Image (cartoon, rainbow, N blue to C red):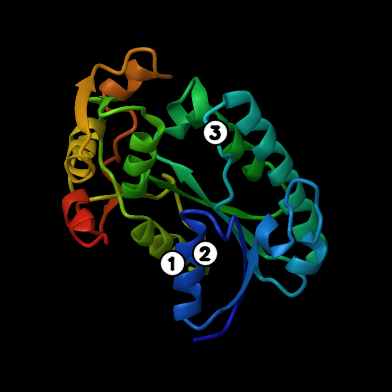
Amino acid sequence: MSITTFAVAGATGRLGRHVVDVLTERGHRVVPMSRATGVDIITGEGLAEALTGAKVIIDVASWHSSDQEAATEFFRMSARNLHGYGQKAGVAQITMASIIGADKATAGFLAAKRVHEELLLSGPLPVRILRAAQFHEFVGQLLDWQQGDVAYLPALPTQLVACRTVAEELVDLAGAPAAPGTPIPEIAGPRRETMAEAAQLLGARRGIEVVGVDGSGMPDADLAANGAFLPGPHAKLAGPTFQEWLDKQP
């Protein structure tokens, strides 16, 4: 196996940590890029140095809130800088993680991801996209945002997937020799459930009662209720179910 240098944008984030682990385990050279490592993909600080000698950029950097406008601006700047600095450094390709259904989204964070895809695809470097379902790890974040002993979460259908599973698929895609065809590949977990059902399993551990609500008021709730953000027929289903994943958490 040839050793490739991968630069990982968002390397210290929820998904990025797993991407770095997978690349390292497979013997590749990894350049972790985040503000914690002195690289800012928005201001460009440290970016030229980080990309020197890199063959592939894996972009898993994300905005920290669901605000559509702020997230869109973050992705606009990051896409411009990764293409610009990457091209100067001789990077061959960018591989990015997106979200299943982003192409259908009209509002909220998913709409920002749709713009992110479009911006990266319109740049000078070749781009590969992997769309993933929501992460198992996201359920705990939803509960963290709620106050008190009762949490109200949407009973909208999802097919949660483990971050580690997404990272493995993303690294496979980034290293694949042939250009992927259409449709854009998708990765999801093996079991369909609602976000509220998954949260009830975690809530039982934390002593929090989770009540499923219809999700109205959420961006594109009608689309979600009709399965727009579920994996398509071509999706790869892999990794543990939420319950299996939860059973292995400390």
Query: Dot 2, how many residues are within 10 Å of its Cα: few (below 14), some (14-19), or many (20+)?
Result: many
> Residue under circle 3?
65
Q: Which amino acid does label 1 sit on?
A: Asp
- Residue drawn at (33%, 35%) of the image: 143
> Which of the numbered marks, if any, corresponds to residue 172?
1
- Residue drawn at (57%, 83%) of the image: 3
> Cβ–Cβ below 8 Å for labels 1 and 2?
yes
> Which of the numbered marks, if any, corresponds to residue 54?
none
Front position in the image: 211 or 43: 211
> Residue under circle 2?
174
- Residue drawn at (51%, 68%) of the image: 20
Quarter of the image that includes the C terminus: bottom left
Q: Specify the farthest residue to the top.
A: 217
Query: Looking at the picture, does residue 28 appear above or below residue 167?
Result: below
The alpha-carbon separation of the residues under discs 3 and 2 comes to 27 Å
On screen, residue 72 versus residue 193, left or right, reads right
Quick one: label 1 or label 3, which is nearer the N terminus? Answer: 3
Q: Which amino acid does label 3 sit on?
A: Ser
Front position in the image: 72 or 174: 72
Q: Where is residue 160 in the image (x, y as percent from the top left)?
A: 28, 44
